[in-house]
Image (spheres, rainbow, N blue to C red):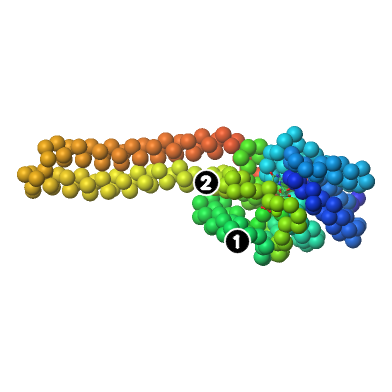
Amino acid sequence: MKKLISYIFPIYNESGNIALLHKTISDLLATNKAYNYELIFINDGSRDDSLEQLINLQHQDDRMAVIDLSRNFGHQLAVTAGLDYASGDAVIIMDSDMQDPPSVSFELIKRWEEGYEVVYAQRRSRKDTFFKKLTAKWFYILLERLADIDIPRNTGDFRLMDRKVVNELNKFRERNRFLRGLVSYIGFKQTAVLFDRDERHAGETGYPLKKMLKFAADGIMGFSTVPLRLITHVGYLISGLSFVGIVYAVLRKIIDPAVTVPGWTFIVISILFIGGIQLIMLGIIGEYIGRIYSEAQNRPLYMISSVFSKKSTN
Ligand code: UDP
Ligand code: MG
């Protein structure tokens, strides 16, 4: 039996792109009959005629499934809805604005057939605004520094995942999700395919600054408690400085009592001492909040790649 490949396309106001996307993908898939294909379009609360266009296309193409979300939930949740629905042996996530060239998906499939379970498309170059390039670059540098896991640079959500990986990913039900981080976290055999990212074909980005900041926060806070731990470090720093201040205040009182205002030494010492202690205590509380946070995320504890035993059948 032929293997099934699922494509997931999140759609938010992509009126100008849907027809071209569907045509490009259809032409591409017609060149490789070795697989069956499933095309999953998730309408993420579009305000244009995206949904009508999708439904019309679906009538003519029964490989297509259209999932219409009740409102705009954001890119990451739209993709999640697609992942929950997909039944393919491999699942490919792509943007719908033609920035991820459909032809690259075949290269992903090729690497998958070589045995890789996650094949992510890595940007060799990108055509975006100067601002977008700059913020993206700094975001990835910061993420690399802070996060507890290695998230490959210059990758978006454009990737192929094996069924095994998708099954594991679907167990992660946290709300503020950063999918590419979760995929790294899950592990399995991963590799990259390089590609040149095109310009958006039509319409405008669904990621204005506000959504971008939320996305960045999900990435960093989802995989790091460094910001919380920062409080403790600042606490130690302030305490250290306070100690110097305290020594100074005491020496001043002993060596030069005439110029010291009565009560000054005591007040200075108390302020410095309490300030440092407070920050350290806040840091300790932060440490616990960090733990509560990771427990609340309720992630599965481990992911199994395979079991070899008398009992297993494969
Ligand atoms: N998208 C979505 N919901 C949103 C925003 C975007 O489903 O709230 C989709 C959008 O239709 C596209 C993909 O996510 O297929 C990437 O979005 P976009 O191209 O706007 O982001 P950019 O490339 O500017 O980062
Ligand atoms: Mg785009």
Give the side of residue 152 with respect to residue 69, left or right: left
Estimate the x, y position of residue 285 in percent, counting from the top left.
Answer: 42, 35
Report helix, strand or loop for mark 1: helix
Within 8 Å: ligand 1 and the Cβ of disc 1?
Answer: no
Estimate the x, y position of residue 61 in percent, counting from the top left.
Answer: 91, 47
Rendered residue at 29%/45% (across/down): 239
Task: Give the class, few, some or many, for how many residues have Cα within 10 Å of label 2's Cα (few <14, many ≥20).
Answer: some
**Which of the 4 image quarters holds residue 79?**
top right
Rendered residue at 47%/47% (across/down): 226
Question: Going from the N terminus, do you reach mark 2 or mark 1 first?
Answer: 1
Say how many tags the image has: 2
Q: Which residue is mark 2?
A: 224
163 vs 62, nearest the viewer: 62
Residue farthest along the right direction in this orientation: 60
Q: Quick check: can you spot residue 101?
A: yes
Rendered residue at 60%/61% (across/down): 130
Amino acid residing under circle 2: Ser
Give the side of residue 190 with respect to residue 33, left or right: left
Q: CA distance from mark 2 to mark 1?
A: 28 Å
Q: Which residue is mark 1?
A: 130
Estimate the x, y position of residue 291 in percent, counting from the top left.
Answer: 50, 37
Task: Give the class, few, some or many, for how many residues have Cα within 10 Å of label 1's Cα (few <14, many ≥20).
Answer: few
Amino acid residing under circle 1: Phe
